[in-house]
Amino acid sequence: MKKKVLTVALAALLTFGALSAPALAGAEDVVVENAWSRASIGMNRPGAAYMTIRNTGDEPVTLVGLATPLAKMPEIHETKTNAGGVSSMSPAVEIAIAPGESVALEPGGLHAMLMRLQEPMTEGDTFPLTLLFEDGGEVTVEVPILGVAARGPED
């Protein structure tokens, strides 16, 4: 009986911790903070997700992909603006994060592009987004969907 109570208490602690703390990946070297996205207008246009990914370890980590049931084609994209002021977006094959450094996925730069949405992104909902790392490690974070005009996680 004592073992069952301990197991239930541990499960509750882990569940509560996952909801209130940053997500940790693999060997607890990657922390994902301030994840957010904007509501979509239907499903015909792609969505995007933003966050900060921090490497707290002693070795570099490399983000190589994304997975989510919300979109058939989640990819890491980068927006660049040339000297003439023309912006373009292209897939970023991988993102290396040095020890002690962080990478921001934010509007106008690197971001998680969510193409071929399977359902509308509705304000107030959340969705799971799994970050895939070169070493096979994964981290899943619940991404809150904010309003269409949101500019950051505080909106």
Image (cartoon, rainbow, N blue to C red):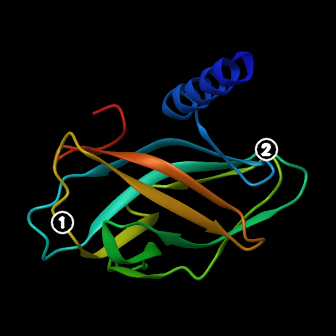
Residue positioned 48% across, 32% down in the render: 19
Residue designated by label 1? 119
Using the image as rendered, state which of residue 41 and residue 119 is in the foreground: 119
Q: What is the x, y in percent for residue 151?
A: 29, 44
Q: Quadrant of the C terminus?
A: top left
Mark 1: amino acid: Glu
Q: What is the x, y in percent for residue 132?
A: 61, 68
Q: Secondary structure at mark 2?
A: loop
Residue designated by label 2? 56
- Dividing the picture into quadrants, the one containing residue 42 is bottom left
Determine whether 114 is above or below 140 in the image.
Answer: below
Q: Quadrant of the N terminus?
A: top right
- Dividing the picture into quadrants, the one containing residue 40 is bottom left
Q: How many marks?
A: 2
Residue farthest toward the right in the current orientation of the protein? 58
Question: In 3D space, how far apart are the residues under numbered discs 2 and 1 (Cα atoms)?
Answer: 34 Å
Using the image as rendered, state which of residue 123 and residue 54 is in the foreground: 123
Q: What is the x, y in percent for residue 45?
A: 17, 74
Say whether disc 2 or disc 1 marks the residue closer to the N-terminus.
Answer: 2
Q: What is the x, y in percent for residue 104?
A: 55, 53
Determine whether 120 is above or below 25 in the image.
Answer: below
Determine whether 146 is above or below 133 in the image.
Answer: above
Residue positioned 12% across, 77% down in the render: 44
